Image (cartoon, rainbow, N blue to C red):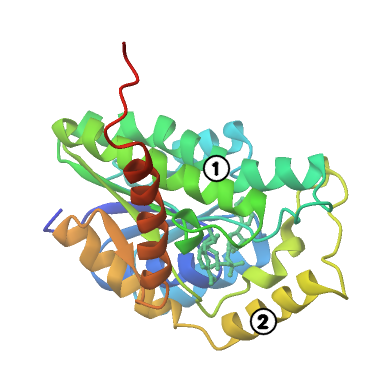
């Protein structure tokens, strides 16, 4: 999508971090942006701050892990701006627990916010983008954890899911004039390590991460890396460029490229082991 000026974007998780960075950069590029988030106060502030820059933006509160609320947010966006061209499925949470500590509540929360919201986002906004015939773009925020595991089972599963969904939809939606990209950030300076601030009550109690042992050390390391992470505005700039140039994968840095190479090497090794065998007799 080359010409962004005058187009409309709907961005989830836009009150903080990466979503805020994307919303800001798109607004600066002349895109009308509907910011969507579950955290009302942060959302109101984010919208007010952007309006001070003369951007054409508005906000809508929604818990994206509820399909009905996402649908209502889409309706509000159409009522406000008429058309939607760009969907950014970005809202997400860190957590889900590790082996031995996960619970149904932590799985349900992680799958609901990180994965089902993306499925529903596509389902609800895809036809809206198609309807006006001007083309559009869908960007979904996965993670490097969508390509290599290590952030915790539930988080990894949802992020692999977002990558899989995006790769498949890129092929399926191209003939319909919709570009599809998946954003796979490394460590970004956001509030992700404080995701529990936004647990919808219906999921039940989400346990705090452990304070001792290897998992606690891991969480401390991630907290440290996130606190010194990449500026979300830099990520926003990459997303804008990715939309304009129709990139399929939007990465933020090369830190984890060697680990992804290792994963591909292990997969290739699996194929090498059975090369030459005859499975069909
Ligand atoms: N920060 C990183 O290092 C990093 C790395 C890789 C991927 N990501 C992904 O980036 C995305 C954005 O996270 P972030 O790092 O900016 O964290 P963040 O906590 O700063 O922002 C996430 C936003 O999503 C909102 N949100 C949470 N639950 C919601 C719900 N149910 N409905 C609507 N909005 C909800 C929050 O209120 C918040 O504004 C997530 O999908 C996350 O998994 C982050």
Q: With respect to residue 277, does 47 lie above or below?
A: below
Outermost residue toward the left in this view: 2
In percent of width and height, residue 56 lies at: 34, 64
Outermost residue toward the top in this view: 281
Q: With respect to residue 254, does 6 lie above or below?
A: above
Among the 4 quarters of the image, the one containing residue 234 = bottom left
Q: Earlier in the sequence, mark 2 or mark 1?
A: 1
Residue 244 visible, this angle: yes
Q: Quadrant of ligand 1?
A: bottom right
Neighbor class of circle 2 (other Cα within 10 Å; few <14, some 14-19, many 20+) is few
Residue at 50% across, 67% down = 47
Out of 90 and 54, give the one closest to the viewer.
90
Residue at 70% across, 59% down = 95
- The residue at which mark 2 appears reads as 221
Out of 232 and 79, give the one closest to the viewer.
232
Residue at 14% across, 60% down = 245
Determine the CA span between mark 2 and mark 1.
25 Å
| Label annotation for residue 115 | 1
Residue at 78% across, 73% down = 214
233 left or right of 157?
Answer: left
In percent of width and height, residue 100 lies at: 83, 51
Q: With respect to residue 272, does 206 lie above or below?
A: below
Q: Secondary structure at mark 1?
A: helix
Q: Secondary structure at mark 2?
A: helix
159 left or right of 82?
Answer: right
Q: Depth-wise, is mark 2 or mark 1 nearer the camera? A: 2
Q: With respect to residue 126, does 218 lie above or below?
A: below
Whether label 2 touches label 1, CB < 8 Å: no
Residue 61 visible, this angle: no
Neighbor class of circle 1 (other Cα within 10 Å; few <14, some 14-19, many 20+) is many
* Quadrant of the snapshot with the C terminus: top left
In percent of width and height, residue 215 lies at: 77, 69
């Amino acid at each position: 999508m080359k010409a962004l000026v005058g187009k409309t974007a709907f961005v989830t998780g836009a009150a903080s971090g990466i979503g805020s960075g994307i919303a800001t950069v798109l607004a600066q590029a002349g895109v009308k942006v509907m910011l969507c988030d579950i955290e009302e106060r942060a959302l109101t502030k984010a919208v007010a701050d952007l309006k001070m820059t003369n951007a054409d933006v508005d906000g809508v509160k929604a818990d994206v892990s509820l399909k009905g609320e996402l649908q209502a947010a889409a309706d509000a966006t159409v009522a406000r701006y008429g058309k939607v061209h760009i969907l950014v499925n970005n809202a997400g949470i860190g957590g889900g627990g590790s082996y031995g500590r996960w619970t149904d509540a932590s799985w349900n929360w992680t799958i609901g916010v990180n994965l089902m919201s993306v499925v529903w986002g596509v389902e609800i906004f895809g036809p809206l983008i198609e309807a006006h015939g001007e083309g559009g773009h869908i960007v979904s925020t996965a993670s490097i954890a969508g390509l290599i595991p290590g952030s915790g089972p539930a988080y990894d599963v949802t992020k692999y899911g977002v990558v899989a969904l995006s790769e498949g939809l890129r092929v399926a939606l191209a003939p319909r004039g919709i570009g599809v990209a998946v954003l796979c950030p490394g460590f970004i300076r956001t509030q992700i390590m404080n995701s529990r601030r936004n647990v919808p009550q219906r999921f039940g109690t989400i346990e705090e991460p452990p304070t001792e042992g290897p998992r606690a050390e891991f969480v401390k390391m991630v907290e440290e890396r996130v606190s010194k992470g990449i500026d979300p505005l830099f990520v926003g700039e990459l997303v804008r460029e990715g939309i304009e140039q129709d990139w399929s994968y939007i990465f933020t840095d090369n830190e984890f490229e060697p680990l992804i190479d290792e994963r591909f090497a292990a997969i290739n090794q699996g194929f090498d082991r059975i090369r030459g065998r005859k499975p069909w007799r």
